[in-house]
Image (cartoon, grey):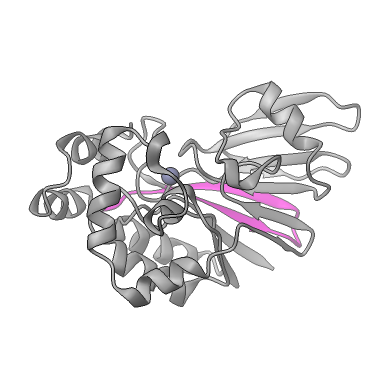
Amino acid sequence: MRVGIISDVHGNLAALEEVLRAIDRLHCEQIISLGDAVGYGPQPEECIAAIASHTTVAILGNHDDAVLGRTDPVYFNALAYDALLWTRQNISAAARQKLESYLLTSRRDGFLYLHASARSPQSWEYITSHGDARINFRCFTEQICFIGHSHVPGGFFRDVDGHVAPLLPGRIELREGRRYIINAGSVGQPRDQDPRASFVLLDQQAGLVEFHRVAYDITRTQMLMRASHLPDFLVWRLQVGY
Ligand code: ZN
């Protein structure tokens, strides 16, 4: 089974369409979305629809949850909050219903999928340090926990002796006894100084995880954002991957 893993689409349809085309070229049988379909970007309705028609599993992110009024946006910065209010006003009841069906976690074929952290999936905490990773490796038993949330692709691995080390994006050959926390990065708002959309391929038979980047028409998304009066900073950051 080859699985395309996407995350943090954030209403950026131009980016999502390119990623779906790339995943198609890689002959994936399934696509899993790790959350934050909406927030920031100008086409939440279209992204929710595309995720519904292309993915086997859609995971819930903090922005999805906040749009539904369930996560308190007190933790959002002012610009994310503006985008959240805009998103609430620009999705249909049917799209809301799709967001309501998103899962907090999913276990499939021996892998764990969620948005933020295995330790407490709905606290929306980040896994950025060795310490965070060490705690989280104790909170799941699968070989890999796939996450999103930070918008930075990469992750950590843990050896049989308990040693934890960072994992750089690239081609990862999975090793017996080794366990992984893998962040798919972001389709719609990358933050690692590479503006190209990010996703991950999991090849279960080959025991392989590959990080991929695809260029997309950033100006198309930016024009729509300006037309919708979304904050300038959110428009600008797309072109620098920040
Ligand atoms: Zn996000």
x, y percent for residue 17: 34, 64
Identify the residue shown where x is 39% and y is 34%.
191
Q: Which corner quadrant holds the N terminus?
A: bottom right
- Does residue 18 appear left or right of residue 220 in this picture? right
> Residue 177: image x %, image y %?
88, 41
Which residue is at 70% across, 30% downward? 133
Q: Please say whether residue 169 is one of the residues in the magenta stretch.
A: no
Regarding ligand 1, which quadrant of the image does it lie in? top left
The quarter of the image holding the C terminus is: top left
Q: Quadrant of residue 15?
A: bottom left
x and y percentages locating residue 62 in the rendered image: 47, 48
Classify 85 as above or below 32: above
| Front in this rendered view, residue 216 or 86 | 86
Majority SS type along the magenta span: strand
State yes or no: residue 206 in magenta. Answer: yes
Q: Is residue 94 left or right of 175 when viewed as pictured? A: left
Q: Which residues are magenta?
A: 198-216
Image x and y of residue 212, in percent: 49, 48
Residue at 49 percent of width and 36 percent of height: 150
Q: Is residue 16 above or below residue 171?
A: below
